[in-house]
Amino acid sequence: MTHTPTMQLSAKTRADMERNIAKYPADQKQSAVMACLIAAQTEVGWVSPEVIAEVASVLGMTTIAVDEVATFYNMYDTKPIGRHKIVVCTNLPCQLSNGERAANHLKQQLGIGFNETTPCGTFTLKEGECMGACGDSPVMLVNNKTMCSFMSNEKIDALLNELRASAKGQPA
């Protein structure tokens, strides 16, 4: 299998990928595909076709095999997103515990719907499946890393203000 990557990830990201690959026997390094995709997405901001080709090259996989992983799991963004991705749980238990209210409040505050990005590029709003925190509803996941629970309108507004402040002055 020969791959010609069309991009070069940073030395830091490559080292992170190599640390994850080292967790597996050499003949099973493809098992690190999810961790390698996360490392690359963290650097690039999304899983572009070039990122998929680079990860495939590093792991000795076909690009379609890496693409299948990237498109199956919702933590990978296969299209450019805003600086902050907010995923709202919309499964039934959350819907029955103010999940719909929280989603509607976010849509109103951001002026966008699900799978859309604000014109300024600060926020992308997504709908999510069960996050395993039904008793904490409504729940949201911010930037694939921070779980936010019991999200009242006031807590949502405070979160948006905090994320807006953190985005000011940072390069896109």
Image (spheres, helix red, strand yellow):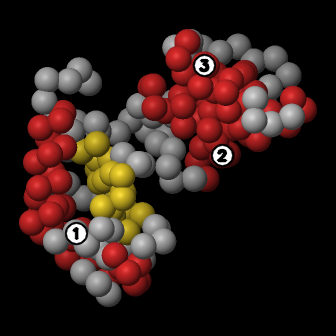
Q: Amino acid at mark 1?
A: Met
Per the model, the C-alpha gap separating discs 3 and 1 is 37 Å
Residue toward you, 75 or 6: 75
From the top left corner, tell me how far across and down residue 6 is, in percent. 60, 14
The answer to whether residue 78 is above or below residue 53 is below
Q: Amino acid at mark 2?
A: Val
Residue, disc 3: 14
Residue, disc 1: 151
Rendered image quadrant of residue 81 = top left
Per the model, the C-alpha gap separating discs 3 and 2 is 19 Å
Q: Amino acid at mark 3?
A: Arg
Between disc 3 and disc 1, whose residue precedes? Answer: 3
User: Is residue 162 shown left or right of residue 18?
Assistant: left
From the top left corner, tell me how far across and down residue 128 is, in percent. 42, 64
From the top left corner, tell me how far across and down residue 23 is, in percent. 75, 35
Per the model, the C-alpha gap separating discs 2 and 1 is 31 Å
Rendered image quadrant of residue 28 = top right
Between disc 3 and disc 2, whose residue precedes? Answer: 3
Q: Secondary structure at mark 1?
A: loop
**One can see residue 130 in this view:** no
Residue, disc 2: 69
From the top left corner, tell me how far across and down residue 12 is, in percent. 53, 17
User: Is residue 33 shown left or right of residue 103?
Assistant: right
